Amino acid sequence: MTDKEIIQLFQISDKAERAFNLLLQKYQQRLYFMVRRMVVIHDDADDIMQNVWIKIWKNLSNFKEESQLYTWLYRIAANETFTFLAQKKKKGTISFEIRREEDEVFDGADRLKADAYFDGDEIQHKLEQAIQSLPDKQKMVFQLKYYEEMKYEDMSAILGTSVGALKASYFHAVKKIEENLKKD
Amino acid sequence: MELDNQPDDDLKLSPLLENLRHKNPFQVPQDYFKRTEDKIMDKMRESKKVKIFSLHHLPKIGIGMAASLLLGIGIYTFLSTTSPQKMSSSDLREALKSLPKDEVNDYIIMNSNSLNNDLIAQTLDLNRQHFELNIKGLDSTTIDKYIDDIDEQFLTEQN
């Protein structure tokens, strides 16, 4: 079923629940992994996604059909993720933190190794360390392009940033990650 | 899915990264997505019950509803009577600060394609102004600092 059909179904009062369930089934995994790659820890991603879906449910009736549903969904998930990361940073209890000063230890690597739900080899650990060392918004840009192959135009609708700036941000993220991977 | 999965030249920027791209090391507990689907549907049904309950207690929440309505009218009136030509972006930003952030965020989400929403997004999102600068030709350290600053600013505004 297309997004448009799901929205049309949602507008029929006794079919709204069914439509929401279809939407959930269609986008649940994609949104979860987008959030998970940002926050790393499964429990954090789980908490965020539950809030995201409740917000989607509460606001779906006001969704304007002239925009793309999937960018709207991503926008909600991205905002919720950024808010979570900002709050965690303020509290100083971020689940996965990599300090950028040269002499500091990458405690994020230890967290990854301790996470029962991270199953990566050495190079994947290094890749995740490198990704997590990016500033949050650049990390989001990188993830959306690298893993999801999202068009910059769609990313622009989600993040409210110009296409040119997104391209520059992605390009620079790739260079930084490459440099990190080549170390040692 | 409406995503465009056409091959993208930017993904070929790094052969090293390209080789790692299709592996997903992030796992989830067994049956996680099915269980979560059930949990979210339960929460959704709960929120529906709350809504029905609220209607029966209208007098008790009348003030809150009136406040929300006034806020909605306030935003609408504010946007209807304000244009970039009439108000500077700093004035607009100051004015928007007086509104509760959650309400503004919800408004933006719900009106993501309207012209007025673009105005709000432009005003709230300082990144846009910064990103319009041409960063080509800057050295790597400067760009790093630039992106870090933007990111910090973005997160501050999100909070």
Image (spheres, coloured by chain):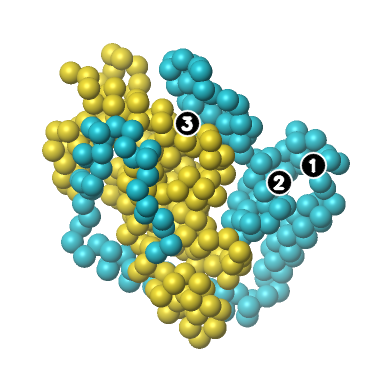
Chain colours: A yellow, B cyan
Residue A9 drawn above or below residue B81: below
Taking the view exactly as shown, the residue that stands out farthest to the bottom is A14
Residues at marks 1 and 2, common chain? yes
| Rendered residue at 34%/40% (across/down) | B11
Residue type, numbered disc 1: Pro
Is B158 left or right of B81, judged from the image as shown? left
The amino acid at mark 2 is: Leu
For the residue labelled by badge 1, is the local secondary structure a helix, a strand or a loop?
A: loop
Residue A8 lies, in percent from the top left, at 53, 78
Q: Identify the residue position indicated by label 1 in the image.
A: B84
Q: Are marks 1 and 2 in contact (CB under 8 Å)?
A: yes
Q: CA distance from mark 3 to mark 1?
A: 28 Å
Which residue is at a point 50% across and 72% down the rendered structure image?
A4
Q: How many marks?
A: 3
Please tell me if label 3 and label 1 are on a single chain.
no
Task: Please give the chain letter of the residue carrying mark 1.
Answer: B
The kind of secondary structure element at disc 2 is helix
From the viewer's side, name the closer residue of A26 and B70. A26
Q: Which residue is mark 2?
A: B119
Neighbor class of circle 2 (other Cα within 10 Å; few <14, some 14-19, many 20+) is: some
**Mark 1: few/some/many CA within 10 Å (<14, 14-19, 20+):** few
> Horizontal and vertical percent for residue B56?
63, 80
In the rendered structure, which amino acid carries the disc numbered 3?
A: Ala
* Mark 1 or mark 2: whose residue is earlier in sequence: 1
Answer whether residue B109 is visible to the viewer in this image: yes
Q: Is residue B47 visible?
A: no
